[in-house]
Amino acid sequence: MTDATFSSTEREYEAQFDDYVELLKPRVMRLVIFTALVGMVAAPVAVHPVIALATILCIAVGAGASGALNMWWDSDIDAVMKRTVNRPVPSGRVKRAEALAIGLTLSFMAVIMLGLFGNELAAGLLAFTIFFYVVIYSMWLKRSTPQNIVIGGAAGAFPPMIGWAVATGGISIESVLMFALIFVWTPPHFWALALFRNDDYTAAGVPMLPVTKGTRVTRNHILAYTLLLVPIAIAPAFTQIGGVVYFTVAVVLNAVFVYGALCIWRRDDAAAGADSYRAEKRFFGFSILYLFVHFVAIMLEAVLRAFDLGVTNWPVWY
Amino acid sequence: MSGIHPEHELHTRRRGRNMWLGLVLGAFVTLIFAVTMVKLSEPQNENPRAPNYSATAGVSE
């Protein structure tokens, strides 16, 4: 090998550290870190801060690894959609083989380290989450059914359950409800996005609901899932992790969310096109705040309990 | 002279990436060390079949 091999005139773009970080979907990782942390903090068993930090990092790296594997598998459709065309693989900054290697290596390491730092159940749940997101959602459901996001949403719903499992070593009604909150929230969140990004999904051939069943059916589905979400979102108020603060926050957020879903349901494509999908975009933006504030409220309840500031006669049903 | 020598342009080009990778590996090692310290300081009574060394400590036959 000679110096000529590395000639600056012939070399391709070389991936920088930032490109590899972007491969791990840092925005998704932030949500994963936050919800896993809330699951851990809300649990009735205290976790040593060092163990908490180490296990949260494992969960975040596991989520990032599944993001890298998703980018490896979906690079063809990512290259077609405006929203994803600048991702590291379709833009050519990171090679597909690199994305696969990084995804597999980090997945393996994250699961093993979580087993060592935390416990076997948490590691098993993380392994299942990665498998579910990459194989069940990305490889199978995403391109084959308009219900892709309904079932695939489970992958994003596991982090608080994993955080809870790190602390308690088990699964309970509280962690299942946190899972259900994210799971049922995911379809209306993504269908609202799909309504105003319909062209992207059509071009890529991804059978999102508006592409296969039309926007009327999608609007009906958004309302139905939002109504289904209401009892699921309020139920944690009456468990060990809830309280009056969570209940108040959940009632207000769900009232606004249902109103937003009703606005979308009442409209048709002509009305939506006239104001550039204003209601749909607002609903999508609010949905992110909706989930974030629910988990902030759960964390707030945990802090209040820690300082014995909770309401003592609040009904706890589970 | 052929081959990669220390001042090659390749090193400059990859310096940022390698520095970050070094930092990540350093942080990983530190994390394992910190977790090990915490685990060792926890009570060792989770496995009932594990020998209880403290019970026999100082007893000579």
Image (spheres, coloured by chain):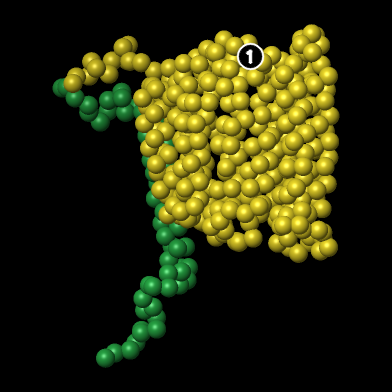
Chain colours: A yellow, B green
| Quarter of the figure that contains the N terminus of chain A | top left
The location of residue A284, given as percent across then percent down, is 72, 26
Q: Residue furthest left?
A: B1
| Quarter of the figure that contains the C terminus of chain A | bottom right
Q: Residue B61 falls in which quadrant of the image?
A: bottom left
The location of residue A245, given as percent across then percent down, is 80, 51
Number of marks in the image?
Answer: 1
Report the side of A78 relative to B3 (left or right).
right
Label 1 marks a residue whose chain is: A
Mark 1 residue element: helix
The location of residue A21, given as percent across then percent down, is 48, 32
Which residue, given by chain and number where applicable, does mark 1 sit on?
A211
Q: Residue at x 29, y 90 (%)?
A: B60
Depth check: A301 or A178 in front? A178
Residue A147 in view in this figure: yes
Please state which amino acid type lies under the numbered disc 1: Val
In this rendering, the answer to whether A91 lies above or below A68 is: above
The location of residue A31, given as percent across then percent down, is 61, 38
Q: Residue at x 46, y 53 (%)?
A: A120
Q: Residue A170 falls in which quadrant of the image?
A: bottom right
Residue B16 in view in this figure: no
Q: Residue A281 falls in which quadrant of the image?
A: top right
Q: Residue at x 61, y 19 (%)?
A: A208
In this rendering, the answer to whether A155 lies above or below A97 is: below
In this rendering, the answer to whether A253 lies above or below A197 is: below
Q: Residue at x 82, y 59 (%)?
A: A314
In this rendering, the answer to whether B58 lies above or below A235 is: below
Local crowd at mark 1 within 10 Å, few (<14), some, or many (≥20)? many
Report the side of B41 relative to A304 (left or right).
left
